């Protein structure tokens, strides 16, 4: 057990990761040595940043907490603190159920942890953080919460109303990160397109991205988690006009049948969804679209699912994830609908949908053979350097594998890579310059 060392463990999404990075900066500013997601935690204090989104994530968070409780009981740990979405949502229950934890914090009051450690919150570091990602890219959170009322989603229950960060503060954070060597920014929020509505009374995402793109040293900007209804169309112009705004959009569509879109309370129709996809591809040539779809929501008929399959075949998404509906207490669907689709039917639909997408992904990857792309190198594994094109977000999208062949490439640098081969998931290439 190392004195004055704190182990921080982050579960869940990249939005949680940003919170952990801010906490780590504060802890380091107060003289602690901090490890993040260490495979062998040995500090005298541990902080677990939890996820409370869906069943599997909640289970993972609970198991992690119990594992550290055991270490504490064995004398390998002095103090255990828990923060994040799970404890925001189930604070009272967790206090009762897991008394071994010294204190639970919610998602937004984690800075109280510093006071409980006898330390002060350092206002000077308010927009600074210690990156846990490779130093050439960072996640940039532009807002918290969500005003959407999708039937299945517990996020607004956990995070509350949409709250945008002031634009000047975000841009200042970008400048600080660029000075530290960050070249690539993954722009994240629960819902990007709503950015600015609360602060400035209109959608300000296009202006924010345009101003960000003008900051020297910003090489790539990639957008995550947009919403299809009332999409801010001026963003098309920004993506087209600025080479450093990646031709990539992560937009969760969830379903296509009007029956399901209504039940899910998505406030968008099948026709509007098809129109938006067409507009993206017309206005931003070569854009790569990533989406997430859901199967098994209460009321999904075989006809609805057939429509969804047809949609995947027609839309030919460059990247696609899907998941089976899981009932979340407190949500509209948990109160109003019966979760009446058997687990095995949900799983069958999920497998079928992903099978269709896998074929599409393989076909689209093969079309890249013979082309040359600008690739950023993330790491080296064995005999390969591994990088990404502007169409690939870290950890969720395909990668580009470049055989070292005795050549040295630098992590965090861009290279022109000629694609020589592809499989279902990744591309293979060689550096041409």
Image: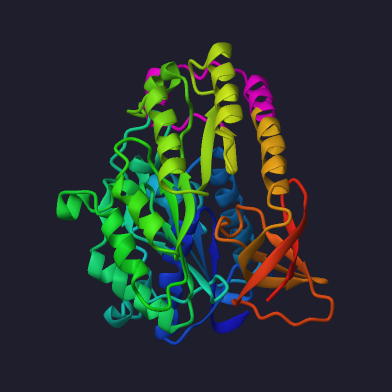
Residue 383 location, x and y as percent?
83, 71
Q: Is residue 364 left or right of residue 297?
A: right
What sort of colour scheme is used for the picture? rainbow
On the image, which quarter does residue 259 sit in?
A: top left
Say if residue 421 shows up in the picture. yes
Which residue occupies 54% across, 72% down? 132
Q: Establish if 415 lies above or below 156.
A: below
Q: Is residue 81 magenta?
A: no
The C terminus lies in which quarter of the figure?
bottom right
The residue lying furthest to the left in this view is 201
Residue 201 location, x and y as percent?
15, 49
Residue 178 location, x and y as percent?
42, 79
What's the magenta region?
324-352
Q: Nearer the viewer, residue 266 or 28?
A: 266
Q: Nearer the viewer, residue 375 or 396?
A: 375
Q: Nearer the viewer, residue 35 or 286?
A: 286
Residue 210 location, x and y as percent?
31, 63
Q: Is residue 341 magenta?
A: yes
The N terminus lies in which quarter of the figure?
bottom right
Q: Nearer the viewer, residue 315 or 148?
A: 315
On the image, which quarter does residue 35 sit in?
A: bottom right
Which residue occupies 52% across, 53% down? 12
Q: Establish if 419 lies above or below 383.
A: above
Say if residue 38 shows up in the picture. no
Which residue occupies 45% across, 52% down? 224
Q: How many marks?
A: 0
On the image, which quarter does residue 260 sit in?
A: top left
Q: Establish if 166 lies above or below 344.
A: below
């Amino acid at each position: 057990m190392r004195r004055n060392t704190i182990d921080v463990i982050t579960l869940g999404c990249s939005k949680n990761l940003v919170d952990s990075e801010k906490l780590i900066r504060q802890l380091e500013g107060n003289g602690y040595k901090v490890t993040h997601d260490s495979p062998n935690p040995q500090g005298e204090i541990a902080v677990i940043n939890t996820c409370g989104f869906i069943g599997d994530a909640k289970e993972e968070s609970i198991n992690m907490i119990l594992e550290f409780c055991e270490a504490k009981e064995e004398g390998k740990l002095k103090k255990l603190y828990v923060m994040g979405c799970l404890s925001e949502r189930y604070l009272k229950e967790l206090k009762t159920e897991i008394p071994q934890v010294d204190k639970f914090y919610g998602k937004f009051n984690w800075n109280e942890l510093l006071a409980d450690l006898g330390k002060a919150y350092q206002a000077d570091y308010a927009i600074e953080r210690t990156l846990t990602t490779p130093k050439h890219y960072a996640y940039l959170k532009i807002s918290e919460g969500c005003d959407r009322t999708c039937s299945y989603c517990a996020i607004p229950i956990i995070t509350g109303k949409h709250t945008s960060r002031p634009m000047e503060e975000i841009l200042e954070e970008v400048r600080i990160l660029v000075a530290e060597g960050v070249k690539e920014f993954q722009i994240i929020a629960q819902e990007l397109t709503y950015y600015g509505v609360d602060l400035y009374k209109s959608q300000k995402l296009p202006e924010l991205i345009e101003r960000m793109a003008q900051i020297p040293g910003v090489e790539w900007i990639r957008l995550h988690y947009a919403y299809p209804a009332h999409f801010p169309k001026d963003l098309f112009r920004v993506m087209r006009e600025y080479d450093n705004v990646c031709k990539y959009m992560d937009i969760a569509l969830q379903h296509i049948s009007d029956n399901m879109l209504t039940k899910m309370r998505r406030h968008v129709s099948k026709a509007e969804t098809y129109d938006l996809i067409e507009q993206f591809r017309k206005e931003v040539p070569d854009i790569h679209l990533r989406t997430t779809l859901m199967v098994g929501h209460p009321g999904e008929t075989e006809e609805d699912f057939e429509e969804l399959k047809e949609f995947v075949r027609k839309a030919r998404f460059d990247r696609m994830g899907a998941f089976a509906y899981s009932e979340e207490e407190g949500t509209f669907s948990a109160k109003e609908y019966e979760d009446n689709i058997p687990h095995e039917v949900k799983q069958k639909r999920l497998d079928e949908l992903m099978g269709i997408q896998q074929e599409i992904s393989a076909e689209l990857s093969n079309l890249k053979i013979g082309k040359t792309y600008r690739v950023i190198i993330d790491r080296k594994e064995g005999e390969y350097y591994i990088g990404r094109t502007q169409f690939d977000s870290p950890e969720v999208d395909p990668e580009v594998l470049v055989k070292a062949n005795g050549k040295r490439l630098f992590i965090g640098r861009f290279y022109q890579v000629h694609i020589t081969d592809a499989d279902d998931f990744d591309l293979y290439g060689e550096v041409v310059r």
